[in-house]
Image (cartoon, coloured by chain):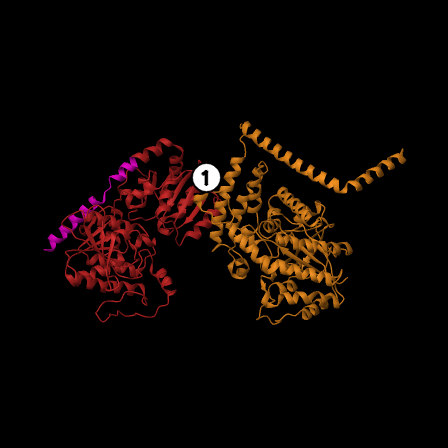
Chain colours: A orange, B red
Amino acid sequence: MKTICLYFQVHQPFRLKRYRFFDIGSDNYYYDDYTNESIVTQVSERCYLPTNTILLDLIKKNKNKFKITFSISGLAIDQFQLYKPEVIDSFRALADTGQVEFLSETYAHSLCSFKDEFEFKKQIRMHSEKIKLLFGVEPKIFRNTELIYSDEIGATIASMGYSGMLSEGAKHVLGWKSPNFVYCNNINPRLKILLRNFKLSDDIAFRFSNKGWNEYPLTAQKYAGWVSTILENEPIINLFMDYETFGEHQPKESGIFEFLKKLPEAIIEKGISFNTPSEIFRKSISSGAINVPYPISWADEERDLSAWLGNELQNEAFNKLYDLKHLITQVSDIKLQKDWLYLQASDHFYYMCTKFFSDGDIHAYFNPYQSPYDAFINYMNVLSDFAERVKEAIPGEDDIFKKMQILEKTIQEKNSEIKLLESRLKARNKITGKADHEAKSDAKSKKKTKN
Amino acid sequence: MFGWEFPPHISGGLGTACYGLSKGLIQQSDLDLLFVVPKAYGDELLDNVEFIGANKIPIKSQKVKLTENERTIDYLEVRSTIAPYVDPEEFWRIKSTEVSDQFTTIQTTEEGFVEFSGTYGSTLYNEIEKYGIVAQRIAENNQFDIIHAHDWLTFPAGISAKKTSGKPLVIHVHATEFDRSRGNVNPHVFAIEQWGMTEADHIITVSNLTKQIVIEKYGIPESKITTVYNAVEPNEELNAVTIDKHNNNKIVTFLGRITMQKGPEYFIEAAYKVLQKMDNVRFVMAGSGDMMNKMIRLAAQRKIADRFHFTGFLKGEQVFELLKYSDVYIMPSVSEPFGISPLEAMQSNVPVIISKQSGVSEILKHAIKIDFWDIDAMADAIYGLLKYNALSNEFKTKGKAEVNSLKWDQAALKVRQIYDRVLTTEN
């Protein structure tokens, strides 16, 4: 098998507004709507919409030969629905071709895999439901936030019934091994793993428009040449990157769109196919287990968690956030649950990173703060207010009245939900009534024959 | 009188003190005041200030009306980049970002005025020298009996005015290099301070603590030094601020520059101790400074960042608002010549905890006094004031009465006595 797995990550966090100490207790809206709307609109117009159009054309042109994979975070989807719903439509158009796979991930693009297994599973389910609702397919393969992976996370994912997962081809984990094979989890070998080829991925994602690079300018022909040389001996190349590479990190003027338009043909000509992770896992067997006792990710030179949990500020904020995990389960308020999700986004911790030297540029991208300290202060103020609201929402031991109120409210909410679902079911029955009727009579006749 | 800032542009207690003292002095009907300031913002107390040909003469001259009576003081500004709390290195950093290569020497215009506007090409010390030369001109052009200079940046100006006019010089020490640097004394600054103290006919210190430093570290005879404590203005603005307190969280406030001198780390350690015992309390560190980032990291290390808040630098009304929210005010300064800010907190009915290493602790009775390094005592005091209402109520009422009795006109009277004494010995 000679194949390429092309996968893009789509994510936008809800950025926080400037939240002062004085606001604690009086203001419980935390988000900077203006910034969020303008960033989502800008990235949609420069990247998501034009690239989706190009990919749709490519899929139609190369019938059944060009396949791609996406993972879109729940927060990104929420923001598309709020600010730019046509982006959802254009992803749906891609989904309808049947050549696109959508991956599962945590709804909030969060780091909860380390702290809170309950929350981790809950967010994964939430995300799967959302993807199914919007694109009609249930994700079968998992991708953790920023490709974070460890043996234990893999085992948890396997226990949830996933057959495969994506991660980074980190050198310190692989050693002499090549990322261009299928591997499996160390604890549960049924979970297969694809590893990112960071050299070839970053050639496009980071180096494409770099005029100081000795391979500049990169053409589709040249790139296809590199790929086919590698694939003479090895089965798969995994190209994983941020979707914003197209049109945003690499601007339109760099020729990135032309490169993308030419690339599939150039590669297919060499007898190489494009496949989605599901197809690859179905067709191939694992070449062995990888041993990842400490978590890896695709971020920075270190390929570890230091971009999010590398200094004391980040750890403090992270621990204080997840100190609330037991309280949150007792809260039914929808607004609080939403804030809980949005505050978990890994980006908030990313902004507090103090390793400016090696990867400062990437950290500065869309960063609303002037310094990591600034980011920390703002986040902690928001978190303090949030924690107070959570505590207030939880009834005390002796506060039966309040408990009753909450229970009543839950019953009301559930009732209205049941009504809504019933009405939907009725509407659907009307449409498919005939087919349903036939099915029923079918079942009856079967029963009769049994008797 | 040589100072360097005037409200509302105050970066520390010095501007407030100069303002209060000036106001107190002109209560005395036989005294006229000429105030020279090295930094011009252009909008000092606009409604009270009258500009006289600001762009025609190199030295800005204004009449400042002080509200109580119709008397005015003459207020001169010399445009310069000297700022009160900037140390030489920081000054260099600020300067190095400006485009500057002109005016390395003192230039005069055709009419013979000293240029002090636009760009500055010199170092801090050069700048101070320039201020001294300007002071000479002022001394030539104005009639006066006594010169009063506030803190080291104005000492050279005071000295050159003395040399030109032959009038006696009184210097006012609000802080010494030993307070600012916590041991890391800049020898150049020290030299200027010592020069000023030696040349002065009399020295006013803001506390006995400072007096002791001047005697011990600068070798000045005690007979030449008198302590005059600062006072505090009744603050109408403060009373005008209204807030509504949203929840039952207690708030403990630190307000000031986050620098070594102010002892911020002891506050964080004490906060950590308090939080082990009670949870409905928040700590606020308001202000900015070179140790701010370090303090943020320290709060994170102690895992109290959800209860310990940094606001950054706060402006006028925000300060009053914060004071209104506060349940305890703390000033754990390692070395504080005086410290006006606790007095402002007391005006606002907030019990205060101050370090024994502050000048203000010499006069205050209704405040909890602790050693800056004694975080156990500090934590204990915070806890006590928050938990036992009887205690905090006592401090609130008695404290306010006490602070209201500290009046600037009394301080000004003491200063006047010093003037009179110096003038009689002179003649």
Q: Secondary structure at mark 1?
A: helix
The residue marked by circle 1 belongs to what chain?
A: B
Q: Is residue B102 left or right of residue A428?
A: left
The chief SS type of the magenta part is helix
> Residue A426, how many percent across, how many down?
72, 38
- A293 left or right, relative to B396: right
Determine the residue located farthest toward the left in the rendered image: B427
Q: Is residue B424 a member of the stretch shown in magenta? A: yes
- Residue highlighted by disc 1: B275
In-front residue for pair A70/A307: A70
Position above or below: A202 against B347:
below
Q: Quadrant of residue A202?
A: bottom right
Q: Residues within 10 Å of mark 1 (few under 14, many from 20)?
A: some
Front residue of this view, candidates A54 and B248: A54
Vertical comparison of A292 with A341: above or below: below
Q: Which residues are magenta?
A: B398-427
x, y (%) of residue B265? 41, 47
Residue A9 figure quarter: bottom right
Residue A96 x, y percent position in the rendering: 72, 54
